[in-house]
Image (spheres, rainbow, N blue to C red):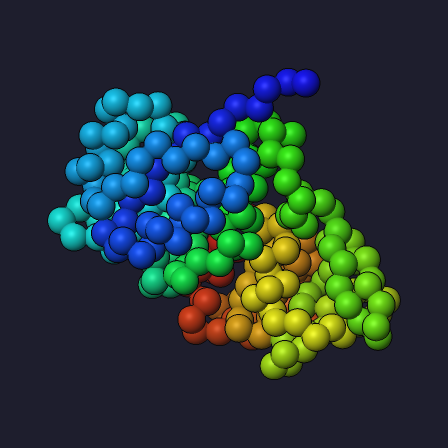
Amino acid sequence: MTQKKDISCIIVDDEAIAKEVIAMHLAKIPNIKIVASCNNAMEAFSVLREHEIDLIFLDINMPEISGISFAKSINKEVKIIFTTAYRDFAVEGFELQAVDYLLKPISFDRLLKAVNNYFDIYANPTALEIQNDDVNDFMFVRSDRRMIKIDFESIIYIESYSDYIKIHLANQTIVTRETISAIEAKLPSRKFLRIHRSYIIALKYITSFTNEEIIIHNTALTISRSYKKEVLQILEKF
């Protein structure tokens, strides 16, 4: 059997609890090696001089040197997953071609999705043998007391109604008792986009968009103010 390559990473955050949560989540994922946990950018610079690091979990809002400034100053071969409590920094994070952008508090499912994004793009896709819907092309949801298989390619958009969601497919709509955030964590991030607290859309089904709404499969969906900057930044790259 081929030996899998460990991914060397560091955690950079001035909040002790935030570092502990990330480290706890990473400890559950095979082939991830935490080289250091740093309180600020200066400590991280020292680690980078002494070790070959593949991936950094980087807080944005830090004293003296911000995560954004730090990311701009390091070797671009070192990949970044930004972590922050503030959604407003998302556009800057994506401009720096970050692997992902995690909002605190960070759940294990969401962090695992970010790590899988890294493996999918920058490492051998077979290197991380871990059961997660993001490495498949489908997911299962419970509806009418049955588990129903849904291919990601068949999803047009997802709509939230409190503790229920509607998954709109070409020929049917599936209703399941689930939160939209839990479903979002199962979706491949390069194919889907959250545009509103109540809507997730499949990028391939977009027919047009404005600053206010997206037309998808003859349905107009509103882009909410809190998601607008991030959404438009991503859409304008296509």
User: Percent x, y for residue 35?
Assistant: 35, 32
Q: Residue at x 39, y 35 (%)?
A: 34
- Residue 170 versus residue 236: which sits nearer the camera? 170
Q: Residue at x 75, y 51 (%)?
A: 138
Q: Residue furthest left?
A: 64
Up-down relation of residue 149 to residue 99 (above or below): below
Residue 122 in view: no
- Residue 35 versus residue 205: which sits nearer the camera? 35
- Residue 145 versus residue 151: which sits nearer the camera? 145
- Residue 219 versus residue 2: which sits nearer the camera? 2
User: Percent x, y for residue 152?
Assistant: 73, 54
User: Percent x, y for residue 216?
Assistant: 68, 66
Residue 152 in view: yes
- From the viewer's perspective, tell me whether residue 156 is left or right of residue 53: right
User: Percent x, y for residue 90?
Assistant: 38, 56
Res 174 quadrant in image: bottom right
Res 41 quadrant in image: top left
Q: Residue furthest top?
A: 2
Q: Residue at x 70, y 75 (%)?
A: 177
Up-down relation of residue 94 to residue 46 (above or below): below
Q: How many marks?
A: 0
Up-down relation of residue 94 to residue 31 (above or below): below
Quadrant where the image shows the N terminus: top right
